Amino acid sequence: MPPDPPILYSYFRSSASWRVRIALAIKGIDYEYRAVNLIKDGGQQRTSEYKERNPMAQVPALVIDGVTLTQSLAIIEYIEETRPENPIHPKDPVARAQARKLAEIINSGIQPIQNLSVLQHVEKLTSRPESKAEWGHFFINKGFVALEKEIAQTAGKYSVGDTVTIADLCLVPQVYNANRFKVDLDAFPTIKRVAAALAELDAFKKADPVAQPDCPEDLKP
């Protein structure tokens, strides 16, 4: 019998889930999508059942090859190592390090600070609903100032040269968040240009939030 398809526990607008969806699409890996609504019922990621899969109560979680993996970049690295076709790491070690650097600027330096759980806690501390938008805008803009300087040194058509890398998998979801928090992308021309080029690729279209089964109808074009 053929092996069971991978199962991705995802939320349509989750940046981390989105990165993994792009990787799966690039690799041509079919999978079963299981939605975890981060808002409904206080957040389905907080249920005891889901926390058995991911004790951090976050998405994504990917069940693949008989194991359950969490943390988006760890998942992507596993997919890359076990399915090396259509690589997302450059062969050149310098370019590979540059791609990982850009990915980590986003993965550890920008996205976690404006993550949903952080924004919810900011609102709780300030008792000001508008503080979430202010916080998200400030830290994405601050991170993009540094990211623009870095990516301007490595970009070709995409973030590092002319082939898609792990940096691009992180960039597109973060640009989406920047737009949600009304960051002026005209101030970051390289980021804006690269994200627009990536948006034309089939794998990125397939992974886009509006293409996911749990995307609300009112958010679809």
Image: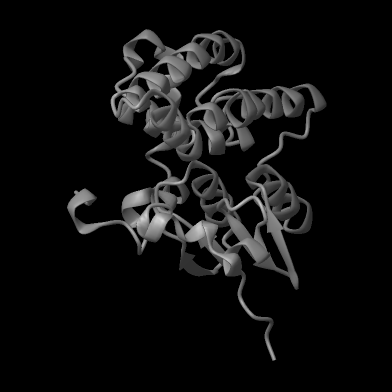
Q: Which residue occupies 68% across, 46% down?
A: 87
Of residues 26 and 183, the one nearer the viewer is 183
In terms of image quadrants, where is residue 155? Answer: top right
User: In the displayed structure, would residue 181 be above or below residue 72?
Assistant: above
Does residue 192 appear in this view? no
| Residue sitting farthest toward the bottom | 1
Residue 193 placed where, x, y %?
Answer: 40, 21
Q: Position of residue 133 (x, y in %)?
A: 33, 25
Front in this rendered view, residue 4 or 47 = 47
Instruction: Tell me the residue at 61%/59% (across/down).
Output: 61
> Looking at the image, how many numbered discs can be counted on the residues?
0
Q: In this view, does 180 lie above or below 78?
A: above
Relative to residue 132, is residue 80 drawn left or right? right
Left or right of 42? Residue 159 is: right
Q: Which residue is drawn at 60% across and 12% down?
A: 150
Image quadrant occupied by the N terminus: bottom right
Give the color scheme: rainbow, by chain, secondary structure or one colour: one colour
Tell me: 25 left or right of 41: right
Residue 103 at x, y percent in the picture:
63, 30
Along the viewing direction, whichever of 6 and 117 lies nearer the viewer: 117
Q: Can residue 70 be seen in this view?
A: yes
Viewer-proximal residue among 78 and 196:
78
The residue at the point 29 percent across, 22 percent down is: 182
Q: In this view, does 121 lie above or below 13?
A: above
Q: Position of residue 221 (x, y in %)?
A: 19, 49
Quarter of the image holding residue 123? top left
